[in-house]
Amino acid sequence: MTEFGHGAAALYLLGALDPAREHAFERHLASCRTCQRECDEFGPVATELSRLPDHEVAALLASGTVDPPRRRRRFRLWWR
């Protein structure tokens, strides 16, 4: 997977990559079947997570079990 390791697809879908890494991952994703498959598999989970109401996200963050995302992202299958 070149410069991207396991888990990069999940980080991308959750909006946890900085803008430069996000753009680099998108370029990588255009030709990497492994990362495309990971996005296909994790995409529905990321979509459901993005639908959580803000108060539920705040409760998760307050519990200390998750780190705050940089931003919330809507999942899309743009590489197809």
Image: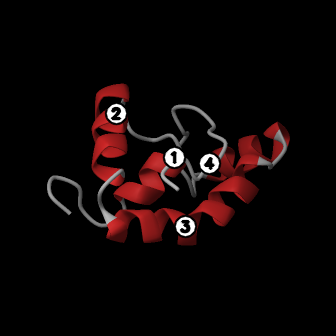
Q: Which disc is residue 40 wearing?
A: 3
| Helix, strand or loop at mark 1 | loop
Q: Place residue 61 in its image quadrant.
A: top right
Residue 52 in percent (x, y) is at 80, 49
* Location of residue 72 with respect to 41 vertically, above or below: above
Residue 26 pos. (x, y %): 37, 42
**Discs 1/2, front:** 2
In the rendered structure, which disc, 2 or 4, sits on the residue that comes first in sequence?
A: 2
Name the amino acid type tagged 3. Answer: Asp
Q: Which residue is mark 4?
A: 76
Q: What count of labels does the image hold?
A: 4
Task: Decide which of tag 3 and tag 2 comes sooner along the chain.
Answer: 2
Quarter-wise, where is residue 65 in the image? bottom right
Marks 1/2: CA–CA distance: 22 Å
How many residues crowd mark 4 within 10 Å: few (<14), some (14–19), many (20+)?
few
The residue closer to the viewer here, 29 or 15, is 29
Residue 67 is tagged as 1
Q: Residues within 10 Å of mark 1 (few under 14, many from 20)?
A: few
Label 1 vs 2, first from the N-terminus: 2
Are the residues tagged 3 and 2 within 8 Å (C-beta)? no
Q: Are marks 1 and 2 in contact (CB under 8 Å)?
A: no
Q: Which mark is residue 56?
A: none
Q: Position of residue 66 (x, y in %)?
A: 56, 53
- Sequence-wise first label, 4 or 3: 3
Compare marks 1 and 4 and give the one earlier in the sequence.
Answer: 1
- For the residue pair 50 and 44, the one nearer the viewer reads as 44
Q: Amino acid at mark 1?
A: Asp
Q: Nearer the viewer, residue 26 or 3?
A: 26
The crowd level at tag 2 (other Cα within 10 Å; few <14, some 14-19, many 20+) is few
Query: Residue beneath label 2, please?
Result: 23
